[in-house]
Image (cartoon, rainbow, N blue to C red):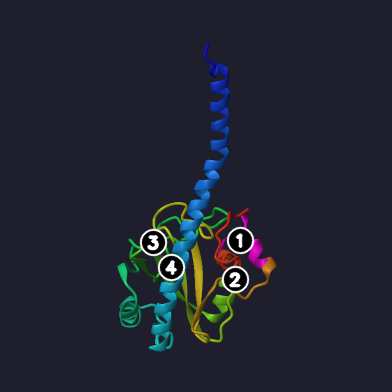
Amino acid sequence: MKKAFTLAEILITLAIIGIVAAMTIPTLITKLKNQRTEAILKEDYSILQQMMISANDEGAIENLAKDNNMDAMESWFKAYFLPYIKVAHVCYDEAGCWSSNVKKLNNTIKSANDITGCGIKTISFILNNGSFVCMDDYDKNSLINLYGVETSSTLSLVFYVDTNGSKQPNMIGKDIFILVFKPETGNFVPAGNDLSEDKVLKDCSESGTGYFCLTLVKNRGWKVFEVK
């Protein structure tokens, strides 16, 4: 007589396998998504940093168009940025390079009622790796009050980077991160860079905007984490 598993034993084994799979697969998927986000984020950071070093050396910030005239802004972008970066497409205050209904961590809509989905009088572009980038200029008071970065420059630039383009969740702090350029150092810093740790932690939570999450990501060795 040959021994074999009973039907009950097989069903119990399958049930255990199902439970283990249900517990581990979501965690594995999240880990893989985070790893991809980390890799793309570091790549985007490097691409934009190299672009800004060259553009700043050529006088991009000093010659920044101050009247929000899109023709002047388009000429400025083509003169100072396009020679130093490869893009799939550029949108000059038009739709197509940024997702609509981008949300903050507290689940409120970030975008104003505009055609770009990013803001009014903005330039956005798509990198060759599929990331969406939206840029806008701000004065020094707005940079510290909105983005937590101090600068001695009268004007500078803020970049929103969506690491997976139009794909969900399209949420600041999860797949969208904010970089601020400091002309006096010639480098990008994450939004929230010059704020206390308590303020950064409060913002990078489910009740916050998510604007300062990149500061935590950078401080944690470029490790993306689940916001709680």
- Residue 107, above or below 197: above
Q: Residue 98 carries which label?
A: 3
Report the number of discs. 4
Q: What residue type is labelled 4?
A: Glu
Depth check: 227 or 12 in front?
12
How far is the residue under mark 2 from the one under mark 4? Answer: 21 Å
Q: Residue furthest right?
A: 198
Q: Nearer the viewer, mark 1 or mark 3?
A: 1
Answer whether residue 175 is visible to the viewer in this image.
no
Dot 4, how many residues are within 10 Å of its Cα: few (below 14), some (14-19), or many (20+)?
some
The range drawn in magenta is 199-211
Image position of 160 with respect to 19: above or below: below
Q: In this view, does 217 lie above or below 70?
A: above
What residue did someone put label 4 on? 43
Label whose residue precedes the other's in the sequence (1 or 4): 4
Q: Which of marks 2 and 4 is nearer the N terminus?
A: 4
Marks 1 and 3, how far apart at CA: 22 Å
Mark 3–mark 4 distance (CA, rounded to whole Å):
19 Å
The residue to which callout 2 is attached is: 192
Element carrying mark 4:
helix
Crowd band around label 1 with a 10 angstrom C-alpha radius: few (<14), some (14–19), many (20+)? many
Q: Where is residue 185 in the image (x, y as percent from the top left)?
A: 52, 85
